[in-house]
Amino acid sequence: MKCLIFLTASVWLTEAGKRSEPMENIVGVLALQGAYQKHIDMLHALGVSAQSVRQPHQLTDCSALIIPGGESTTISLLIQEYGLYEPIKTFADSLPVMGVCAGLIMLASEVDDVRIKPLELMPFKAIRNHYGRQLHSFTADIKLNFDHSNKFFHAPFIRAPGTTQLSPEIEVLATHNDKAVMLSTGRHLALSFHPELTNDSRIHQYWLNRFCQ
Ligand code: GLN
């Protein structure tokens, strides 16, 4: 039963709205390379079960997946080497995927670097290193369109990718200098910056509440 609504650690509602015993409902975090542990830590802090995913069979335990930041050329290569390309695509047909930074690049339908074989889960083009190299990393206060607290999100951009050629069906959830830096289509969410490197769990909580059901 994968159609559960994440509420809190210990309360789960089935589609019928009945309270059920907590079941194995695990968020997978792709752990081939990059900043995966911080996502696992943040999910645990929110009381959500999370496990690293390195092999296709580990996906079957999961009801949602995070593709973390890192180096997209390496992640792309390892996804293929570990036989994860098709399994992730199949997983994404019915379950939510969040892509962060290099993960955003992997979710795009097109990338400005031929070494990357994107998963083509979201109709936009990713521009690698649009915001410059490591040296040009910065944090920016961005407004989250879905959050009405009027509290900016202090977003770390680290060799962050840009987004362009967004299909009209894409919903833009946050921008920086008029560029979409948080966007969704259907059940998937992509971010140019790293919410897991902050102490602010609003984005993970929003993802769990809105997409992981
Ligand atoms: N720009 C990097 C890449 O192309 C991604 C950076 C990141 O994930 N922080 O892989």
Image (spheres, rainbow, N blue to C red):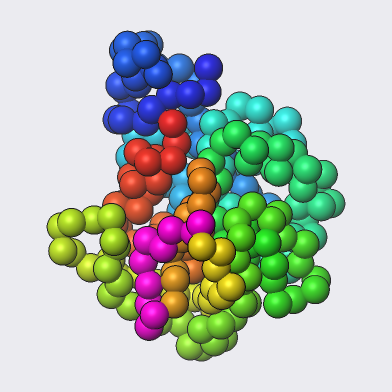
Residue 103's quadrant in the figure? bottom right
Q: What is the span of residues highlighted in magenta in the rendered image?
A: 169-178
Residue 60's quadrant in the figure? top right
At 64% across and 52% down in the image, what residue appears?
A: 121
At 18% across and 64% down in the image, what residue appears?
A: 151
Q: Is residue 101 visible?
A: no
Looking at the rendered image, the quarter that the C terminus falls into is top left
**108 vs 42: above or below:** below
Q: Is residue 158 visible?
A: yes
At 56% across and 64% down in the image, what residue appears?
A: 167
How far from the left and from the top, in percent, is residue 43?
40, 42
How far from the left and from the top, in percent, is residue 160?
52, 75
* Residue 111 vs residue 26, the one in the foreground: 111
Direction left: furthest residue: 149
Magenta segment, principal secondary structure? strand
Q: Is residue 155 left or right of residue 76?
A: left
- Is residue 176 one of those drawn in magenta? yes
At 38% across and 83% down in the image, what residue appears?
A: 177
* Residue 70 vs residue 106, the one in the foreground: 106
**60 vs 108: above or below:** above
How far from the left and from the top, in percent, is residue 32?
68, 52
Disc tally is 0
- Is residue 31 one of those drawn in magenta? no
Q: Is residue 133 left or right of residue 177?
A: right
How far from the left and from the top, in percent, is residue 131?
51, 84
Residue 145's quadrant in the figure? bottom left
Direction front: furthest residue: 168
* Residue 25 vs residue 130, the one in the foreground: 130
**209 vs 71: above or below:** above
